[in-house]
Image (spheres, rainbow, N blue to C red):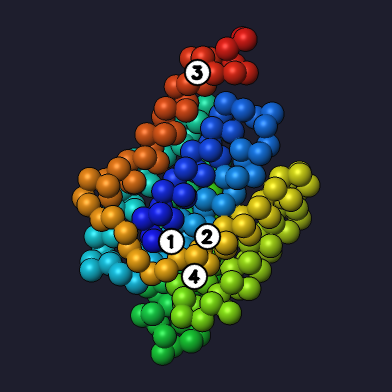
């Protein structure tokens, strides 16, 4: 699979996930499938870091997307335009990108490197970013061990399993903590990645970025209009 194919898959699974959240809360299969999306995006961030020609521009785009998406995210998840309870997942991806940079920049200073990476994980938790520390951990696992997949897959699988356990320990319902383990299935399409980048056009890149806030707004509007079951029955 090319990176373009992985992007399409991640986007489709993300929309399915949020459609289940917003429109079909009684159908858990939507959320199960959606658990694959975030690890795929973390893998794509690691690949983007490896291939980008301008890291600062890449980080700026993610930061802009994160801020633009926050109101649509809050509207869909919390039903209001602003809520500090949780920040959207693009912030988690940005922290992952910064972690990859820090890991490379501080390669010769192990103590400072560890402190920087731990600080980014802590920032994900303190700022209530979606997925907390997991975005940093997965981006590092996919990025630092890309050349050694025998190490990469167990490390990333372990991070996802640990995250599910942490949800359980934090008081999350057992069913949701168990559902988060479906994220492990994301390693199957990642294993099929063949290094090709696939279709690359500015319009496609813009579409992939814009899809996140736009689909959140669209699902919020559909739910508010009550034109999709089960909401159309009042």
Q: Nearer the viewer, residue 143 or 103?
A: 143
Q: Residue at x 57, y 62 (%)?
A: 188
Query: Could you say which is closer to the camera, residue 151 or residue 87?
Result: 151
Q: Is residue 74 above or below residue 55?
A: above
Q: Which residue is mark 3?
A: 224
| 1 vs 3, front mark | 1
Q: Nearer the viewer, mark 1 or mark 4?
A: 1
- For residue 100, say whether it is visible: yes
Q: Which residue is mark 1?
A: 1
* Residue 142: numbered disc: 4
Closer to the N terminus: mark 2 or mark 4? 4
Image quadrant occupied by the C terminus:
top right
- The answer to which of marks 1 and 4 sits earlier in the sequence is 1
In x, y percent, where is residue 36? 57, 52
User: Is there a contact, CB below 8 Å, between mark 3 and mark 2?
Assistant: no
10 Å neighbourhood of mark 1: few (<14), some, or many (≥20)?
some
Q: CA distance from mark 2 to mark 4?
A: 13 Å
Secondary structure under the numbered disc 4 in the rendered image: helix
Q: Nearer the viewer, mark 3 or mark 2?
A: 2
Q: Are marks 2 and 1 in contact (CB under 8 Å)?
A: yes
């Amino acid at each position: 699979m090319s990176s373009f194919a992985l992007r399409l898959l991640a986007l489709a699974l993300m929309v399915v996930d949020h459609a289940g959240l917003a429109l079909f809360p009684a159908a858990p299969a939507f959320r199960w499938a959606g658990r694959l999306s975030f690890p795929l995006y973390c893998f794509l961030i690691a690949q983007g870091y490896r291939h980008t020609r301008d890291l600062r521009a890449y980080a700026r785009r993610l930061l802009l997307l994160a801020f633009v998406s926050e109101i649509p995210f809050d509207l869909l998840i919390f039903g209001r335009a602003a809520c500090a309870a949780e920040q959207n997942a693009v912030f988690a991806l940005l922290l992952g990108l910064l972690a990859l940079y820090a890991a490379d920049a501080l390669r010769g200073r192990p103590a400072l490197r560890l402190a920087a990476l731990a600080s980014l994980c802590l920032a994900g938790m303190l700022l209530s970013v979606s997925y907390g520390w997991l975005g940093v951990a997965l981006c590092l696992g996919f990025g630092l061990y890309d050349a050694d997949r025998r190490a990469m897959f167990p490390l990333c699988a372990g991070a996802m399993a640990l995250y599910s356990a942490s949800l359980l320990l934090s008081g999350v319902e057992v069913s949701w903590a168990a559902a988060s383990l479906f994220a492990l299935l994301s390693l199957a399409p990642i294993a099929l990645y063949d290094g090709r980048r696939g279709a690359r056009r500015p319009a496609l890149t813009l579409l992939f970025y814009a899809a996140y806030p736009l689909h959140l707004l669209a699902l919020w509007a559909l739910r508010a209009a009550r034109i999709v079951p089960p909401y159309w029955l009042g």
